[in-house]
């Protein structure tokens, strides 16, 4: 069954934006070329917040991507670049990118967050606003 993955990164300081943007785009291209990838989308919701959505044939394909290449190198830099990060994965019979409102809902309700939220309180981040010049879909 296909696996959907959604991430959100909030950049710690303006000086890190070029690095985060470049790394996000490189990771998106890596994902698109990875075996088992069905779709990739990157959204610059604001100047300092980036969202990704990916669809994978299965969890094994997704995990192979996560632990390889550009994505693996980025993971080691996130604490330096970002003051917030969130990720959620779920299985879905539809092998397509979820709408941004669905991605936001899933990330808010089921995601893993850094720093962790107070117990019982959802994270406080806004629904990403899609603007055609700020979203990159790689097919």
Image: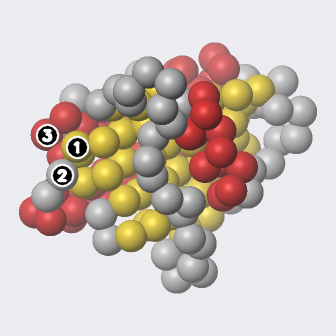
Q: Which residue is mark 3?
A: 80
Secondary structure at badge 3 equals: helix
> In screen coordinates, is 24 left or right of 101?
left
Which label sits in the foreground, 3 or 2? Answer: 2
Tell me how far mark 3 sits from mark 1, CA to CA.
Answer: 8 Å
Q: Which residue is mark 1?
A: 83
Residue 65: give its label.
none
Q: Could you tell me residue 120's position as x and y percent? A: 50, 24
Q: Quadrant of the C terminus?
A: bottom right
Residue placed most toward the observer, 124 or 79: 124
Which label sits in the foreground, 3 or 1? Answer: 1
Q: Could you tell me residue 14's position as x and y percent? A: 15, 65
* Residue 31 appears in the picture as rendered: yes
From this viewpoint, which residue is outermost toward the right? Answer: 93
Residue at image coords 44%, 66%:
44
Q: Which residue is mark 2?
A: 12
Residue at image coords 52%, 82%:
133
């Amino acid at each position: 069954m296909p696996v959907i993955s959604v991430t959100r990164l909030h950049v710690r300081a303006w000086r890190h934006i070029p690095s985060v943007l470049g790394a996000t785009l490189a990771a998106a291209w890596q994902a698109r070329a990875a075996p088992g990838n069905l779709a990739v989308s990157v959204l610059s919701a604001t100047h300092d917040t980036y969202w990704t959505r990916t669809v994978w044939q299965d969890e094994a394909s997704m995990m192979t991507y996560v632990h390889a290449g550009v994505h693996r190198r980025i993971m080691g830099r996130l604490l330096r670049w970002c003051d917030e990060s969130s990720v959620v994965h779920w299985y879905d019979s539809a092998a397509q990118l979820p709408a941004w409102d669905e991605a936001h809902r899933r990330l808010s309700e089921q995601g893993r967050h850094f720093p962790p939220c107070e117990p019982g309180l959802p994270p406080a981040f806004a629904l990403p606003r899609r603007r055609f010049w700020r979203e990159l879909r790689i097919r």
